[in-house]
Amino acid sequence: MAHQSEAQLENNLIKQLRDLGYASVKIADGDALVDNLKKQLEGFNQTTFSQKEFDSILNHLAKGNVFEKAKTLRDRFQLNKDDGTSFYVRFFNTEDSAQNIYQVSNQISLEGSYKNRFDVTILVNGLPLVQIELKRSGIEIKEAFNQINRYQLHSFWSNHGLFQYVQLFVISNGVNTKYLANNKLQSVKQTFFWADANNKNVTDLTEFTAAFLNTAHLGNMIAHYIVINETHKVMMVLRPYQYFATEAIIKQVKTSSDNAYIWHTTGSGKTLTSFKASQILMELPEVHKVVFVVDRKDLDYQTMNEFNAFKKGSVNGSSDTQSLLKQLTDNTKLVLTTIQKLNNAISDRFKNSIDTLRDKKIVFIFDECHRSQFGETHGRITTFFEKSQLIGFTGTPIFAENASKNDLGKRTTKDLFGNCLHKYVITDAIRDENVLRFGIEYVGKYKNKSKSFIDIDVEDIDKQEVLDSENRITKIVDYIIAYHNQKTFNREYSALFAVSSIKNVIKYYDIFQQKKLAGEHDLRIATIFTFGANEESEDAQDFLPGDYEFDMAAEPGTNYQASHSRDKLDQYIADYNGMFGTSFSTKDGQQFENYFKNISQRLKDREKQTFNHDKDRLDIVLVVNMMLTGFDAKKVNTLYVDKNLKQHGLIQAYSRTNRILGEQKSQGNILSFRNLKKATDEAITLFSNKDAVEVVTMPDYEHIAEKFDDALTSLREITPTFQSVDDLQSEEDEAQFVLAFRKLLRAMNVLQSYTDFDWEDLHIDEEEFKGFETKYLDLKDKVQRDTQKEKTSILDDIDFELELIHRDKIGVAYILKLVAQMKGANTSEAKAQRKAIIDLLGGDIKLRSKRELIQKFIDENMPFIKDGDSIEDEFEKFWQDEKILALGKICEDEHLDKAQFKSLIDAYIYSGREPIKDEVFQCLDNRPSILQARSIGDRIIAKMKEYVEVFVRGMMA
């Protein structure tokens, strides 16, 4: 396998698929694809279609985007037949996937913006539902991923958009094989290895084909394990551990009445797994209802939103006990509630109204079953619902080692839920890159006067008066202000701050606010906590419980501490209202609940492309316990900790930071101002295995620095200096440089996230590193130029991973601020600043195309601008003038109608779709000859893209 060519891989794959029951069909182009579709749909629907009828079907299939077509695939189309009758056309059988017709073809050619030929296509009932792209061994699998993205842009939309019905892509170089759902603009992070039930990855293409692409399994995956997410308008496919857990639950319910639980580590997607299990279970004839139980009101709301995102209208949360009783007794198949409401429903007051459910098979699915199910309520539920079956989900089970005593004595997850059906622990998830590692730093040294000012490490500090001291808290605030930008990539991510008590939250917030008013920072800080008589306890349940209501008796004079914290909370909420134009308060429970929801949603919405970073960003949220369990937001990458955490609570809190999101987010950052080293090691060992500590945590800064030096040594063996990149003799040498420098970039990306980072520690200075980076980018530009000239380059087979040098905050606005600083500087300072700006322009991928014009503005316009405050306005005028001149020059050089070409550019900017050459030729005075058409069309499109890159892309940054 290691030495197979792409053609050999393709031939062997097709033969294996034929042996698995696929019919081989030769489809040369789009017309043949349509002809085959007609035949297969006729066979699948056991009828024939006239050409007019089939044209109606094609028109129906052509409507919508990839997301909408995924729904069309699963629906039926009411066809008005020529004889006046109606016929419901099916495109895919989800109930019995074995009834579908499976075919395999290869080298299907489609022409959209460009002509593309696809490797291996699996057709189901004539529709291409799986596309397999292959690369010869030794080529990075990511190249196949990039190729898929290009096909989506250039060809899949052509020929009635039939290739937009692809549900799954498979990418392989024979040795490594991964699958992914069909989504636009996705990251390579959304590609997955298949695995067996024991989480052993199946990477070899032959083994993957046997396990995943056999018709029974593939049909099941498409029918049941692709989820259509309504919120983000994308398809999601279950990962192998989610699939095996769901299958195990279904088998348990079908064959047994015993309880059981699933152990899937925090952050691995338990909500999606539990939703899919609930969805399939409620269709089983033996199951009367499925009741999904959470233990907190905020999770009730969050889970309802996520379930309805996976399937619109699939569930309604029960707002009170009466609504729960109604859903339990009507035709609602899937009920979502809190354990507190469920407890009320089976109390003496209400239980007669649901007495008929005692002998019905109701499956209860408990979210995070490590928490509040360990008590009397659990027993009451199992006693009342005599035929109930309980399935638990947890990322951090309760074992004998971490069980706590209650009225029933020590109880473990196994005691209450029985056997574990499937395990996917934190080491599995990190190995598979389904969650990130944690980069943990223990921060703080304190002087002890009684010990002659000897430095005492943070691990040795346990005196409460020291921990609560305002002086210490102030130093921590200063530290966070100093390093927050570094930790969050200049505030592209948010942070949570776990604090030991509400009393200390108030101290922290007030100090942050004082320093903000003094101009020491402009971080956006918020806090949320509940209040009451026991608010200072470190064990206080600081979250929204199931039926949370404010204690309205807590008015000034009744309880000083409670009223004080409530007054403070209202003050802090008023600050939040001022930042974001909201109107929350603590006047009633609903307003407070809405405040919590707004904070949660604000952190979650940062993932969306439409998020307004400058207007809606929230940087740090101070909490005691709230949001440290169950809360997920991919754009949270940092947790500051000033409270004692242990066991499942520690893992849960840390796991708020380790959701996967692109190349830039390389780890979850944990900055602990407490003695948590031992507790961290114990917790990681408990929830993975005794050797897991090194796998889960990031190594020490010094270890990463050594790795960086090793990578630097390897780089210098190829190119001793960045200037020597120009002396490389062949593309093979250039490829070696790209791979070596990319390894260095990866190490730098991790290294710079440590607060200890200092260029002085490395054997390369920043200027030389930037020199190498510029040469790396130059080679990327060279590949793009060669591709336009239709020159084949081995560098095409290497992904440059530009995200590794992506700097979101360094844009045109940032550069203009630097330019403004040049006004008033003396000659030598201004000269140095100019050089720094030009170097920055050369090193940033977004700004390199704008370098020449920005340099022109600095050299030619800046001397005549007297007021630094007017630089931004003057630059805008300059830019618009240059934009008009550049457009005019393209049109003059290429003999284009300016108005038509401008419209073509606007359409490209809006849709992201490159124009086809016929659209370009319509802008020309005279259509070129056939011999000239291709080169002229390519040249004009290249100029259009360069124009957009210079004058449009990144101008809002």
Image: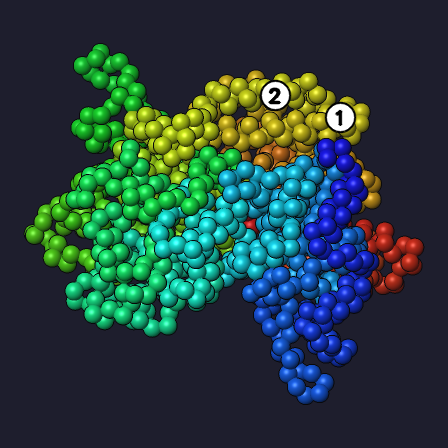
881 left or right, relative to 532: right
Q: Please tell me how many numbered marks the rendered image carries.
A: 2
Label 2 crowd (10 A; few <14 / some 14-19 / many >=20):
many
The numbered dot on residue 733 is: 1
At x 29% / y 58%, what residue is drawn? 338
Q: What is the x, y in percent for residue 947?
A: 70, 50
Q: Nearer the viewer, residue 928 or 358?
A: 358
Q: Is residue 841 above or below residue 295?
A: above
Image quarter where the N terminus lies is: top right
**Which numbered disc, 1 or 2, marks the residue that appears first in the sequence?**
2
Q: Nearer the viewer, residue 745 or 280?
A: 280
**Callout 1 crowding tier (Cα within 10 Å): few <14, some 14–19, many ≥20:** some
As drawn, the residue found furthest toward the top would be: 452
Q: Residue at x 71, y 27 (%)?
A: 736
Q: Is residue 917 above or below residue 673?
A: below
From the top left corner, tell me how far across and down residue 370 is, in percent: 31, 44
Classify residue 141 by image quadrant: top right
The amino acid marked with disc number 1 is Asp
The mark found on residue 210 in the picture is none
Mark 2 highlights which residue?
712
Specify the amino acid type for callout 2. Leu
Residue 147 shows in the view: yes
Q: Secondary structure at mark 2?
A: helix
Circle 1: element type:
helix
The residue lying toward the viewer, choosing from 58 and 925, is 58
Q: What is the basis of the colouring in this image? A: rainbow
Separation of marks 1 and 2 at Cα, in angstroms: 16 Å
- Quadrant position of residue 157: bottom right
Q: Judge left or right: residue 464 versus residue 809.
A: left
Instruction: List x then y, in percent, for residue 496.
Output: 35, 41
Q: Position of residue 915 (x, y in %)?
A: 74, 59
